[in-house]
Image: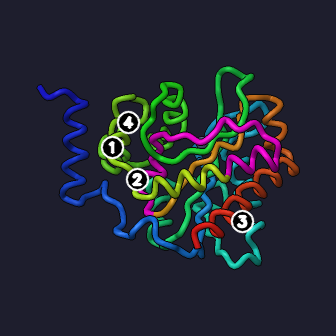
Amino acid sequence: MIPKRLALAAFVLFNALIGASFTFAPKQPGTSKAIDLIVIDPGHGGKDPGAIGAVAYEKTVALQVSLKVKEKFSGSGIKIMMTRADDSFVGLYERAEMANTNKADLFISIHCNANTNKSAYGTETFAVGVHKEDAQLDVMIKENSSILLEKNYQEKYDNFDPKSAESYIMFQLLQHAYLTQSLQLAKKIETNYANQAKRHSRGVRQAGFLVLWKTSMPSVLTEIGFISNPTEEKFLVSGEGQEHIASCIYKACIQYKNEVE
Ligand SMILES: [Zn+2]
């Protein structure tokens, strides 16, 4: 019998060679690119609450912050598209597809972190890619398990099991075409969190997030704080806290735009 890990690796490579589902758009990364359209992706929604805090759901905080980000861009000349603008359930690949179909220039997925250790706090922004630390498996499971609520998820995600460490090998085999730019944007978001909003930045990291896997533009997933930490949750649900976070994401995009255009 072929070991599962090997079979999966062969499958991913085969797909890459025949140009199937794991290839990315043929745009040339690294060239100067105008930033005209940004997709803002509020994590979870509908039947998927995401992480549950003492007073709020992750899906609600993510949507509120996302709407505030959208507001910041009004009059900026940059268009914002939301993957959801209300409490609806949207599949992870559908979110990426929306960005690809509309030829978005950036994709930003907004989430709240959670940990059984209630003292954990701070922000983290991820680009999709190799995970080197075991600790990140928790975050990947938490964010990718949404697919279990999607219809026909086995077919749609090629039998990807979000709860098995082995599934994540595909993220080690192929690099996202816009990894460098994604990390560049992630860095700016984290720097703004630390300097402007005075948050504790846990830094920029890489992990296997399905929502970022198939996008064909620089894409990040930002964890704006731990909803499981009572102090941080208070900040995350407050209008003022959400304004701070939204402003940091907006500023990071403008700084990124000024660098690449
Ligand atoms: Zn989430």
Q: Give the distance between the C-alpha atoms of the residues marked 2 and 3, in whole angstroms.
A: 26 Å
Disc number lying in front (1 or 2):
2
| Number of other residues with Cα within 10 Å of mark 4, as a class: few under 14, some 14 to 19, many 20 or more | many
Per the rendered image, the range of residues in magenta is: 189-216
Disc number lying in front (1 or 4):
4
Look at mark 3 in the image and give the residue it sits on: 70
Look at mark 1 in the image and give the residue it sits on: 154
Which residue sits furthest top?
A: 117
Q: Are marks 1 and 4 in contact (CB under 8 Å)?
A: no
Q: Which amino acid does label 1 sit on?
A: Gln
Q: Tag 2 or tag 1, which sits nearer the N-term?
A: 1
Residue 89: x %, y % from top left: 56, 53
Which of the 4 image quadrants contains residue 115? Answer: top right
Q: Give the distance between the C-alpha atoms of the residues marked 4 and 2, in whole angstroms.
A: 14 Å
Q: Tag 3 or tag 4, which sits nearer the N-term?
A: 3
Which residue sits furthest right?
A: 240
Q: Tag 4 or tag 1, which sits nearer the N-term?
A: 1
Quarter of the image with the C terminus in it? bottom right
**Residue 168: image tag:** 4
The residue located at (39%, 70%) in the rendering is 27
Q: Give the distance between the C-alpha atoms of the residues marked 3 and 1, in whole angstroms.
A: 33 Å
Classify mark 3: helix, strand or loop. Answer: helix
Classify mark 1: helix, strand or loop. Answer: helix
Q: What residue type is labelled 2?
A: His
Residue 152 located left or right of residue 39 = left
**Residue 200: image tag:** none
